[in-house]
Image (cartoon, grey):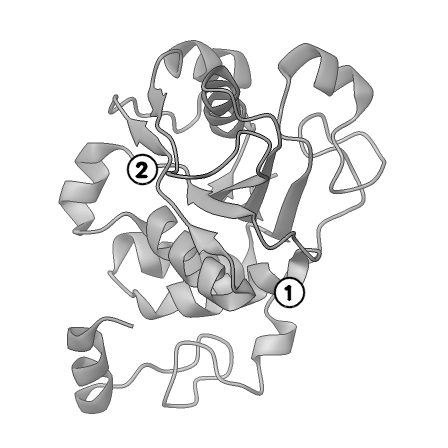
C-alpha cells in the first residue's frame, strides 16, 4: 500500500464494504464471501463449458488468450470494490482484488510473467494511477511471480457500451508490445485487467503480444460484466 494511504488509514480508516466494521475495505470475516461465482461457460460467447477455456468456435474466430481466469461477476461487493478503486480513489481495494484473483488461479510455472492491460492515458491522468497495473503488481507479489510492463497503450478510445466488433475495430493498433529482458518468447504471460465485458480488449492485447512473438498468453480478470 502507498505510504500516504497508510497514513490516511490511521487517521480515517475504511469501513468494510460488506458489514460496515471499521478498519479495512473488506474485513477478514467477510473476505471469503466477497466473490460472485462465475457460471461454467465460455467467457466470450457464454456457451456452457469450462469457465477458463474459450470454446472452439470463439478460439477460431478471435484467437483469445489460451485460458482466462475470471474471479467474479461484476455485481454486488466486487462491483463496489471496482467502482471505489476507479472513481473514489480507494486504492485499498487493490490488495483485496489481487488476493481474490490469486485464489482463482492455478499453479503457474516459476518463469511466468505477470503484466497488465494498460488503462487509457486520459484515465490515468484523471485518477493518478493505472488500476490494472496496481492489481498486476499486487497479484505478482501474491503468487511470487515476476511483474513486467510489456504493453503500452497508444489510444484514449472510450468503449463503454460498444459491441465486441466495434471494440476490436477501435483497438486495432491501440497497443504496442515490448520485451522482458532475458525472457524467452515461450515464457507464459498472464495479462491482468480489472473488468471485461465483451473480451475485446483482452483479444486486442493478446494479438499484440503474439505479434511480438509471445506464444503462451493467458489472462486473469477480476470481474466480468454480463
Seen in the image, is 114 located left or right of residue 32? left
Q: Earlier in the sequence, mark 1 or mark 2?
A: 1
Seen in the image, is 63 located left or right of residue 153? right
Q: Does 177 appear above or below 16?
A: above
Instruction: Residue under label 2, please give it.
Output: 119
Label at residue 64: none
Instruction: Residue under label 1, please give it.
Output: 103
Which quarter of the rendering shows the N terminus? bottom left
| Circles 1 and 2 in contact, beta carbons < 8 Å | no
Q: Quadrant of residue 32?
A: bottom right
Mark 2 crowdedness (10 Å alpha carbons): few <14, some 14-19, many ≥20: many
Residue drawn 17% across the image and 89% down it: 11
Q: Secondary structure at mark 2?
A: loop
Q: Marks 1/2: CA distance? A: 24 Å
Q: Does 89 appear above or below 32?
A: above
Q: Residue furthest right?
A: 49
Amino acid at each position: 500500500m502507498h505510504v500516504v494511504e497508510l497514513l490516511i488509514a490511521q487517521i480515517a480508516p475504511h469501513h468494510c464494504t460488506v458489514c460496515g466494521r471499521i478498519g479495512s475495505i473488506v474485513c477478514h470475516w467477510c473476505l471469503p464471501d466477497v466473490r460472485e461465482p462465475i457460471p461454467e461457460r465460455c467467457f466470450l460467447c457464454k456457451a456452457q463449458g469450462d469457465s477458463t477455456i474459450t470454446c472452439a468456435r470463439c478460439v477460431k474466430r478471435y484467437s483469445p488468450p489460451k485460458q482466462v481466469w475470471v474471479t467474479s461477476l461484476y455485481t454486488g461487493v466486487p462491483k463496489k470494490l471496482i467502482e471505489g478503486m476507479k472513481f473514489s480513489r480507494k486504492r485499498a481495494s487493490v490488495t483485496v482484488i489481487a488476493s481474490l484473483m490469486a485464489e482463482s488461479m492455478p499453479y503457474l510455472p516459476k518463469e511466468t510473467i505477470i503484466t497488465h492491460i494498460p488503462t487509457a492515458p486520459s484515465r490515468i491522468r484523471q485518477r493518478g494511477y493505472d488500476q490494472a497495473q496496481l492489481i498486476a503488481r499486487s497479484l505478482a507479489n501474491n503468487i511470487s511471480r515476476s511483474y513486467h510492463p510489456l504493453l503500452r497503450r497508444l489510444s484514449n478510445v472510450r468503449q463503454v457500451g460498444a459491441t465486441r466488433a466495434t471494440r476490436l475495430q477501435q483497438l486495432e493498433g491501440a497497443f504496442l508490445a515490448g520485451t522482458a529482458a532475458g525472457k524467452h518468447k515461450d515464457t507464459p504471460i498472464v495479462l491482468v485487467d480489472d473488468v471485461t465485458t465483451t473480451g475485446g480488449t483482452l483479444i486486442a492485447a493478446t494479438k499484440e503480444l503474439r505479434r511480438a512473438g509471445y506464444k503462451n498468453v493467458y489472462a486473469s480478470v477480476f470481474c466480468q460484466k454480463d
